[in-house]
Image (cartoon, rainbow, N blue to C red):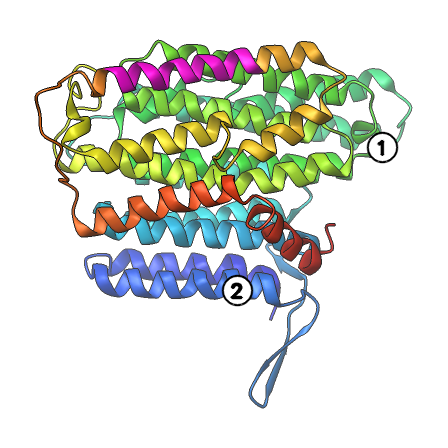
Amino acid sequence: MSAPFLWIVIPFLASIGAWFIQDKRRSVFYLSTGLFALLGLTALAQNIGGVIRLGSTTLELKSTMIFMGRSFILENKDRFFLAFVSFATLFWILGSRISQAPTKFIPLSMMVVSLFTAALAVEPFLYSAVIMELVVLVTLLLLMSRTQPIKKGILHYLIYQSLAMPFILLAGWILSGSQANPSDATQLQIAALLLGIGFAFWLGVFPFHVWIPELAEENQAYPVGFLLTLLPPVALMIILKFINGLVWLRDTAYLPSVLQIVGTVMIVTGGLWASMQTSLKKMFGYIILVDSGFMLLCISVRAQIGLELFYLSLIPHVLAMAVLTYALAYFERHQMEPSLEALRGEMKNHPLVFITIFAALFSIIGLPFFASFSLHLALFENLAAQPGVIIWVLIGYFCLLIAAFRLLVVLLENRYTQWRISESRGDLLYLVSGIFILLLMGIFPSVFIGGIWQTFAALLSLG
């Protein structure tokens, strides 16, 4: 058995099976949670290329699978990715049961994750663009509803993500032609420009970002939250793998500067627009931009610490976005419009929901005692030679902080309502767990974040 078969084919086939029995929600829930828990633990514990022992039976876990003439390769260095997507999907599936997500969510999310893994594993890399286009088509099924017309956010998402494919394929064609003359600097620069444009479409970099807040505002919160939470880090991991395969691009002097500029622009624009929103759903879309910009800044640090910060940032990223998404889904379940005007004075009626929202926002901003504080501090230390970047980044986060305080003022406006807890037991379990984890990771970063990294470094030989 091969690793690609285990992490690509099996989840894909399981998603098809779950699609046909999606009405049996309990069975689909338990089977999917069991599968992704097993895949995540296997990624942590099992070396690719080693032997799996099941009693008297032994199976060699090969790294390569051939399908339709293309190689799908997963190596030990990819185990962080495999563990990340497996546990992140498990976390979202667990939340889907409490938040009453659509029945199609679990089957289609499983299919999306299997295609994400295929996009990382396929060789040559250019086929990643084709597989990512398949991801877009599958997520359309996840986002669309039979009872509602197709909205502009979905159309813009389809257009912008689809535009990435021709740019990346054209860059690959130029690079394949330049192999005969690798010293042709002009061809390499054109290829790098085309790749940059394609990657910008993938990540929603300004000015190609309009689909993100539109998608968040117009569609159901839980499916959109799943997509917007996983798409940026997965796309960045695929981009990192591609850059590492091109020595001339990896070693160029301007690459860190480009990443810093793009990351800073995403943080500033995302924070500025978030501070002016009256819809929490649209604000969530701009928060995605801010967090994606932070990941780009981490990658821009050339030293090993940059990659470590990027990988570590994925943990609070998933947690913060998951609880934010859960809060937005909570509003939908209770027919509450997620706008500042509609939520005026509602803090006392739904305290834990809003406390969780602020915990997630403060973690993303990087305030002390919250999950991302130590990561932001480490990043700023490594960007000390670029004070201009730090100033602009702080401006972006300050704008996001203004958005949080605007929300707080509106929520506390009604002074005559008594405090009461309206959340169900399931809501309380999920929300309190989210707040607790975000605070523990911020108060004891060396124990939780550092401990997690040491585990991955030991298992995956990253440190």
Q: What element carries label 2?
A: helix
Q: In which quarter of the image is the N terminus?
A: bottom right
Rendered residue at 26%/22% (across/down): 151
Q: Nearer the viewer, residue 367 or 225?
A: 367
Image quadrant assignment for residue 32: bottom left
Disc 1 + disc 2, Cβ < 8 Å: no
In the rendered image, residue 403 lying in the magenta stretch gets the answer: yes
Mark sitting earlier along the chain (1/2): 2
Rendered residue at 36%/15% (across/down): 403
Q: Can residue 98 be seen in this view?
A: yes
Where residue 42 appears, as percent x and y from the top left, is 55, 66
**Residue that sits furthest to the bottom in the current view:** 56
Where residue 62 appears, as percent x and y from the top left, is 67, 67
Left or right: residue 191 versus residue 146 is: right
Q: Is 136 situated above or below 274?
A: below
Rendered residue at 44%/56% (across/down): 12
Image quadrant assignment for residue 323: top left
> Neighbour class for label 2 at 10 Å: few (<14), some, many (≥20)?
some
Q: Nearer the viewer, residue 4 or 314?
A: 314
Q: Is residue 155 visible?
A: no
Q: What element carries label 1?
A: loop
Mark 1 or 2, closer to the camera: 2
Left or right: residue 242 versus residue 364 is: right
Rendered residue at 72%/50% (across/down): 462
Magenta stretch in the rendered image = 394-409
Left or right: residue 292 versus residue 273 is: right
Give the number of the disc on residue 179.
Answer: 1
> Neighbour class for label 1 at 10 Å: few (<14), some, many (≥20)?
few
In the picture of the structure, the residue carrying the numbered disc 2 is: 41
Q: Nearer the viewer, residue 219 or 413?
A: 413
Q: Is 423 situated above or below 9?
A: above
Q: Which amino acid does label 1 sit on?
A: Gln
